[in-house]
Every structure is written in C-alpha cells, then in structure tokens.
Image (tube, rainbow, N blue to C red):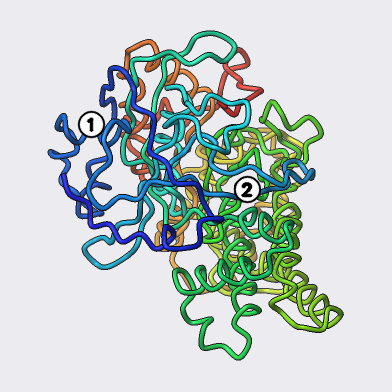
Amino acid sequence: MTFAFDNSYARLPERFHARLSPVPVARPTLVRLNRPLARRLGLDPEALSSPEGLAVLAGNAVPHGAEPLAMAYAGHQFGNFVARLGDGRAILLGEILDPSGERFDIQLKGSGRTPFSRAGDGRAWLGPVLREYLVSEAMRALGIPTTRVLAAVTTGEPVYRETSRPGAILTRVARGHVRIGTFEYFSARGDREAVRELADYVIARHDPEARAAERPYRALLDTVVARQADLVARWLGVGFIHGVMNTDNMSIAGETIDYGPCAFMDAYDPGTVFSSIDHRGRYAYGNQPRVAQWNLARLAQSLLPLLDEDQDKAIQDAQAAIDAFPQRFEQAYLGIFRAKLGLLEPRADDADLIDALLERMAETRADFTNGFRALCALAAGTDEARSAPLGEDGAFTDWIRRWRARLAQEAATPSERAARMRRANPAVIPRNHRVEAALEAAVAGDFRGFDALERVLANPWDDRPDMDPYTRPPEPHEIVRETFCGT
C-alpha cells in the first residue's frame, strides 16, 4: 500500500496544525471504494481493498510517508465569529501527487478526537458519510468543482447522536483544505507573519501566477473572488443549496466542501431552506451569492496587512476587490442560464428574460430541474407534451413566445440547440426524497437503492428509461423539509 506523499502543509510552522494520528477503531469494514478516483490518483484499488488498505482507510495504520495532522482554523458561523474551530473530527494524512503531478489532500473524516474537538467525540456516523459520497460524486458529474470521497468505512463502533448510530469514516480527497476561516484564525490573533506565510503557501500551491503579479496578495484575493463567484453561480444553475456557508466551509481552492445539510430544490423558490439549523434563512438558495460576498469580505479583512502598509489604502484595495464580486458573479450566472435557455450570443435583455422565467416558476411552484429540462424538448420542436413541467394551463405561454422570438435572433438548428441545452440542464439530480430513502436503507444494510441512485447520478444528462423514476418530484408525503449536519 503506497502513497506518493509530498506533504507541504506539514512543513508550515507548528501553530498551523496539531500533529496526531487517527484513533484506531474496533472492527472496520469497507462499504464503499471509489475505484475510478483511486486510479485517477495513481492508487491501486485492490491494495486499498486489502486488509492493509482497510487499516489505512479506517485510521488503524498510518502509511509510510504520511504526516497526520489536524488543521487549525476559525470561522464565522451564521455570522458569529468563533476564534478557534479546527479539524475536530478529521485528520489530514498528507498530500499525494497523482500521475500527472497534481496535488491532492487525503483526509480521514470521523477519525477521532483532536485538540480542536471541543465537546465532540471526533466521530462520524454512516448516514452523513454516505451522503457526502453520493452527493459529491453527483456534483462532479454535474461539472461542479467539489471535494470527493475515496472510501467509506464502518468502524464497528456506535456513535451517539439523538440515538446510537453506526460509526463510519470517510476518506476525503481535495485540492486543498485551506479555508477562509484559516486566514481568520491567524488574523484574529494578530499573527501577521502567519497570515503572510499562509498566503504565500496558497499562492505557491493554487495560484502560482499571482507570484509574478505586481501585487501578489491582491492578485490572490482577486482570484479567490473569481473562483467563488463561479462556484456559487454553478450551484444556482442546478438548484443546489449548500446549507451551511460558514467561512470555515468555504474553500480557498474553490471546491464545494462539507455536504452536511445540503439539498437540491424541487419546486423553485429562491427562499428555499432545508438546513435544520438555519432558522432565519441566512443560507437560503437565493441568498448564497450575497453570503459568498460577505464571506469574501472576511478574507479581505484578514489580508489587509498584506495589501498595503497604509491601512486606508489597504481598505480601499480590499473594498475594490470585494465590490468586483457582483459583476463577476452576474457574468458567470448569466453564462450558465443563457446556456440553460439555449442562447449563444449575449443580448442586453437576457437577464430580464431569465428573471421573467424564474418569477413565473416561483409563482407556479414549477419544478426547477424538470422545468428547464422541458425547454430542451421545446427547443427541439418535436415534443410539446414535454412542456408539462412548466404547467399545462398556459401559464408560460407568453414567456415561451418571447423566448422563441429571442432564439430566432440566432442561427442554430433546433436539434443542435436542444443538444447543447441537454448538456446544460440535467435530467436528474440527487432529489432529497430519493437520497434520504437510499441512505435510510443503506444504514439498515440494504444498498440496492443506494447503488441504483449512484449509477443514475453518474450520468445526469441523457434521457434513459432507468432514470425515469428518479426524475419525478416527490409526492406530498415524500417531501423532505429538513436536512441535518450529522455532527
């Protein structure tokens, strides 16, 4: 069992992390191994499936070259600053270089108590572990930057939440685990040198082109702003709601991270909230762009000492970077929704066309995914019956007439346009009621539903007979109204 470790984060000063090994578990069992991801990383799936590999994935053995540690960070949680959070139930085993030389973190989540655990037990249970596996792979198939799960292992030990639950550990793969909250951790302590070291580290690892810029730290901030604007626009394009957009859950690398109370909308409503702990709707679907900008302002605040020695100039510089977010987001958002409507060439009134559709969908409670998918059939001009998700009472007639007039301004055949639209409008998403049903059965030992859902979500773009049951919105008794963190 060999990993090509090259652990750059472990070379940072000791105040960046706490060194410790995972806490061994009693009777580990491998329940899921992401074989394609293993091969992508240059790892041997058969070796990972062996008793020696299982011992590593369970935290019972530390592989050669690993330098296990828990990362320190802070964070704003629902707007309230917590000065010391850190990896309370995760251990970064190290970083590996894949066959092409790309660097990835290998982290065990649910691997036991650390100095950052506070009152927690440092463990995870099987339901949330399988949720992260399923939804993160679905996000990847949808083309959205995301962390991924290499493996899920049961521990043979119970964990206690509301009741006794089966313990589990997931192996997370990420381009990096530095968060906005990592910068906040050192900024709040007045540790300017640590902020500089962290910024230099991020530039070297993720943004080497910023090093050659006239102002490297401003270039870094601009790049992170652009990445977050693109990421959140992509979320909105598939109806995804992160659920817990705290600054400690916002990756500097621009990947979706932490799949606790996440969910996908069925009926379109920009105020949709699922997270059981988001009592005031801070992280509602439509609030996510504003929250992202707010979070980025916390990053900019942490970087102020690096932007300019003159504090007033540093503040102006930071403000300019944050003020650029709305335009960057709008550009990304319009690009995504133009593609969803089959529009190739930007026009000044496209935003109004998009908004008019969404307003009508909100009024009629139209299904977000099926509504946009129906437009693909309408664009092809071959199956008017497929417009049913947009209402059979003519509610969208005026808008469709306006949309078709806009399409007529561009040269494209109906079949070509429809084919492009099908690559922008998924036929299937991880609908909450399907996810919950699959997880409930899997936790009880029946993985048939989980396996079937995983197969369907791996190819969300093409219409296939096996996908039909997964495209249907929930019946009233199936609606999932709350999702939970699992901590």
The residue pinned by badge 2 equals 248
Which quadrant would the C terminus be assigned to in this image?
top right
Q: Which of 382 and 334 is in front in this view?
A: 334
The answer to whether 294 appears left or right of 213 in the picture is: right
Q: Nearer the viewer, residue 442 or 339?
A: 442
- Label disc, if present, on residue 170 of the rendered structure: none
Horizontal and vertical percent position of residue 100: 24, 67
The answer to whether 37 appears left or right of 145 in the picture is: left
Say whether residue 454 is visible.
yes
Please report contact status of discs 1 and 2: CB closer than 8 Å, yes or no: no
Which quadrant would the N terminus be assigned to in this image?
top left
The residue pinned by badge 1 equals 54
Horizontal and vertical percent position of residue 121: 53, 24
Q: Which residue is drawn at 42% across and 57% down?
A: 10
SS for dot 2:
helix
Q: How far apart are marks 1 and 2 (CA)?
A: 29 Å
Say whether residue 380 is visible.
no
Q: Residue at x 45, y 15 (%)?
A: 440
Quadrant in the rendering for residue 158: top left
Horizontal and vertical percent position of residue 36: 24, 46
